Image (spheres, rainbow, N blue to C red):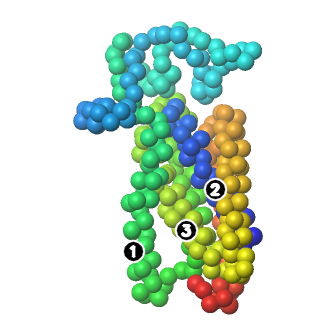
Amino acid sequence: MLAIFAVVVLFWAVFKQNGTALNTWADRYTNREVTGTAQKVFDKFNFAQSITYKQDSVAKYDAQFRLQKEDGNVVKELNYPVYFKNVPENKKPAEGETVSLWATNLSQSINPGWVILLTPLIVAFFSWLRRKNKEPSTATKIAFGLFISGLSALVMVGAVYASNNGGEKASVLWLITSYGVVTVGELLLSPMGLSLVSKLSPVRITSLMMGGWFLATSIGNKLSGVLSTMWDTYSHKAGFFWLNFGLLMVATIMCFAMLKWLNKIMKEKGVS
């Protein structure tokens, strides 16, 4: 159980950045403009915000979107809204024109949306493997979940390069794809991990081991916050996502290294 908890910490440390680093990417580096029918729908449900392309007194940000302060106070400047800072000149609206942007917090709905869409498919896939007697063990699913989650960080590395390190707005498809990949990893790891805890824990301490699982999750959440504080230290954002990829690959190697041992224990316990 302790071995599983160790790799779970690294998974949640990366996964839980959906509310921090990935939210920052959505806010500053993603093209959030909506037009036409989509704009009408978003406006109707208050999913969009309107900003006007005109100069005003706004908070000052540097080229890396780091808020500038002097003596603890936010520096102000006469400029256009910060959203337009990395919009190409030929794509900027006319002076005084208002555009609609989907609200940044909507990006938090992408992962739950993928969970709804992918859960039946993954369940059906493993049911098909089970009928063919080829379904992998729970521990194997966890190992592959870690590996697939690591690939989501590579998607964001691609987003950084495609957007010239945030010099231009990236397509929202990068974010959607990254969330889709990490959701597959989550579905292979999170429910499987809980299943493994319930299967392998001695009956008298099953509740304690469940508490250990959630303790590992909380430690991962804390580590996620620590990692996210490093966002502004990377002038090239690909480095941040390479770090995430590296952490998940370490967890993947650890899990695959223990796989034979874990499967042997599960076989002795009569579980799969």
Q: Nearer the viewer, mark 3 or mark 2?
A: 3
Residue 32, percent from left and from top: 41, 34
How far apart marks 2 and 1 lie (CA) works out to: 26 Å
Mark nearer the N terminus (3 vs 2): 2
Residue occupying image coordinates x 44% and y 41%: 106
Amino acid of disc 2: Trp
Amino acid of disc 1: Ala
Mark nearer the N terminus (2 vs 1): 2
Name the secondary structure under disc 3. helix
Q: Which residue bears the numbered disc 3?
A: 191
Name the secondary structure under disc 2. helix
Give above or below for 29 relative to 187.
above
Left or right, 103 with respect to 157, comes to left
Give above or below for 77 relative to 110.
above
Q: Which residue bears the numbered disc 1?
A: 124
Task: Find residue 260 and name its label.
Answer: none
Amino acid of disc 3: Pro
Residue 270, percent from left and from top: 62, 90
Task: Find residue 12 and name its label.
Answer: 2
> Which of the 4 quarters of the picture holds residue 252?
bottom right
How far apart marks 3 and 2 lie (CA) works out to: 13 Å
Is residue 40 shown to the viewer in this render?
yes
> Which of the 4 quarters of the picture holds residue 11?
bottom right
Give above or below for 146 relative to 197.
above
Image quadrant occupied by the C terminus:
bottom right
Residue 244, percent from left and from top: 64, 51
Number of numbered tags placed on the structure image: 3
Is residue 163 shown to the viewer in this render?
no
